Image: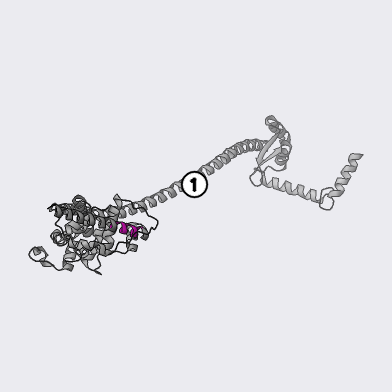
Amino acid sequence: MNNLSDASNHTPSEPDLIQACIAGNRQMQEILYNKYSSKMYGVCLRYCGNTEDANDLLQEGFIKIFKNLGKFRGDGSFEGWIRRIFVNTSIEHFRKKVKLYNVSEVQENTIEDTDLNVLDSLAEKDIIALINELSPGYKTVFNMHVIEGYSHKEIAELLGITEGTSKSQLARAKGVLKKSLENRSNKKSNDTINL
Amino acid sequence: MQNFKDRLFNYEANPPESIWDSIASELDSGDQKVMQMPGLRKRSRFLFYSLTAAASLIIIFLSSLFFEKTAKKSADQATTLVNKNYDNRSTVVRAKDSLNNITLEGIIKSSKNKSALAQTQIGKQKKYITIAGPGGQPVKISSKVATLIVSADNDYPPKAIWDKRINKWKQIMLSSTLSPTATNLLDIAELSSMRGDN
């Protein structure tokens, strides 16, 4: 801990870093920010449609983290704890903007994840661009379920909707994505023919 | 190629450099608040409770003083009023007594016919005079009784004689067959009624 002032020369251990950040050491806080900002900015970009909102989310999320670091009990991974804060901040942001109405459970056309395997061949930026074309409700549920791995029950609790609504939103999101991928594929083949 | 889910999960992008500056400045302003607020809040809370307790004690003390004073004042006023009334009455009685005593003293010390003198002197002022009774209480007596007292003894003030006379009358009344007792009261009433009928 005594060498924390020379932290720029070496990376302190995670517990030391956390303790120093709790103590308000600005230098250590900057190190923590630099360590996780890129990953968390990726999360923010997935949940927000634009970089402006993503910047706001990143700032808001890190301020929450620095103010609540003392609550981290060290049970799980620190990165997981940080990620949860960012997902929750994104959800709050989403809830401020969008109101999701519960729908009666309608049997949606099931779209298998295999239909989205085309996404595997795309670059991350392109996938994010496709996801960002979704409506905020679809996008949030898709991100939470498909990417973060939340169950529909958890999504329902976090977003204040029913499990049925969560499932319905996901099915529609997948449908829209599938259509976008088909359009994209058709456009690509047309471009190839025109060449 | 890696699964799109994992790639998106681990997706990284470089945020604008200005974001850290914004975070740092917000943390600085927050720190100032954090540095000031808890202490201030704690201190002001303590101060608030202390002042409330002190104010309550002062109010209770002042209220008790006020009520005590008011009660004492009321009691004093009541006592003063009673005393005043009593004093006024006493003054009147004393003045009357004094006048009567002077009259009686004049009669007793006179070498003339006391009975006649009493009649004359008392009659000049009024029909009845007030004298101090055996217990010191004011007693209204007729001029005849006054003459009787005076003529009985030259002792002044005539308290002992007064008592003696009263006792004597009592004896006379008790020994009299016509005086009302528990046994003869109805007989006397019947006799009186018969006399009235006749």
B196 vs B120, left or right, is: right
The span picked out in magenta is A165-173
B163 vs A147, left or right, is: right
* Residue A172 lies within the magenta run: yes
Q: Amino acid at mark 1?
A: Ala
Label 1: chain letter: B
Looking at the image, residue A100 lies above or below residue B126: below
A103 vs A69, left or right, is: right
* Residue A90 lies within the magenta run: no
**Residue positioned most to the right:** B198
Is residue A118 something one can see in this rendering? yes
**Residue positioned most to the left:** A9
Q: Looking at this view, is B67 or B143 the one in front?
A: B67
Main secondary structure along the magenta-highlighted residues: helix
Where residue B128 sits, quadrant-wise, is top right
Is residue A71 something one can see in this rendering? no
Across and down, in percent, residue B74 comes to: 51, 44
Q: Looking at this view, is A84 or B64 the one in front?
A: A84
Q: Which residue is mark 1?
A: B71
The quarter of the image holding the N terminus of chain B is bottom left
Q: Looking at this view, is B181 or A74 the one in front?
A: A74
Q: Could you say whether the residue bearing mark 1 is in a helix, strand or loop?
A: helix
Looking at the image, residue B117 lies above or below residue B35: above
Across and down, in percent, residue A147 comes to: 24, 62
Across and down, in percent, residue A70 comes to: 24, 63
**Badge 1: few (under 14), some or many (20 or more) residues near its Cα, within 10 Å?**
few
**Residue positioned most to the front:** A193
Residue found 34% across the figure and 63% down from its top: A153
Across and down, in percent, residue A43 comes to: 21, 59
A112 vs B103, left or right, is: left
